Amino acid sequence: MRILGVDPGLTRCGLGVIDTLPARKAKMVAVDVLRTPSADSVDLRLGAIAEAFDSWLDTYRPDVVAIERVFARNDVSTIMGTAQASGLTMGLAARRGLPVAMHTPSEVKAAITGSGRADKKQVTSMVTRILGLDAPPKPADAADALAIAICHSWRGALSAQSTPGANKDLTERKAGGRQGSGLTKAQQQWAEAMRRAK
């Protein structure tokens, strides 16, 4: 399964693509951080992110998009930009019928490091190790996007597969031309293989 992880942000939006492998392994396909100038108007910045994100969807053709869930902070301007970028990427993925999964920051940290309170350095270190990279992905937004994709590969697909009625809902969504947050056939096969490997 190919997963596109998104660490949403208006100034820096991290994107990371991984391919899942047997035995809870993964391989990095691509990673980058989309940047927009803070001096530009919000509409231009979102337009630039939309164009770049669409290009990533065309180039890497993910099976699912995993996005970090926005959480409340004291800085309203930061949370607004993060929420706008998050909603934009969700909408663009949904428009193509791609499943979208959301994972909280603490869920991602716990999946990657074993602790929901891990710092960015610990997450980056584990992402580097898990993916067998020669050097840590930089900046932190790049490592975070890969961490979100890894988290989904380990937690998201299996939990969605075990959700009662998930396959029925998926069939109904496919009939309507949209998949929502259900699993594709490839994801179902991968999840089944993971269950058998345990």
Image (spheres, helix red, strand yellow):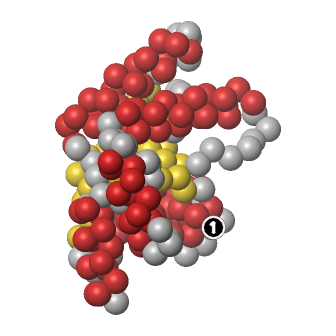
10 over 154 or under it: above or below: above
Residue 83: x and y in percent read 61, 34
Residue 2 locus on image (x, y percent) = 26, 56
Quarter of the view holding residue 84:
top right
Split into 4 quadrants, where in the image is the C terminus?
bottom left
Is 66 drawn above or below residue 85 in the view shown? below
The amino acid at mark 1 is Gly
Q: Nearer the viewer, residue 143 or 100?
A: 100
Residue 18, relative to residue 71: is it above or below?
below
Element type at marker 1?
loop
Is disc 1 surrounded by few (<14), some (14 to 19) or many (20+) residues within 10 Å? some
Asked whether, in this view, residue 139 is left or right of residue 120, the answer is left
Q: Which residue is mark 1?
A: 116
x and y, in percent, of residue 152 in the image: 43, 62
Quarter of the picture holding the N terminus: bottom left
Determine if residue 5 is in view: no
| Residue at 39% over, 53% down | 172
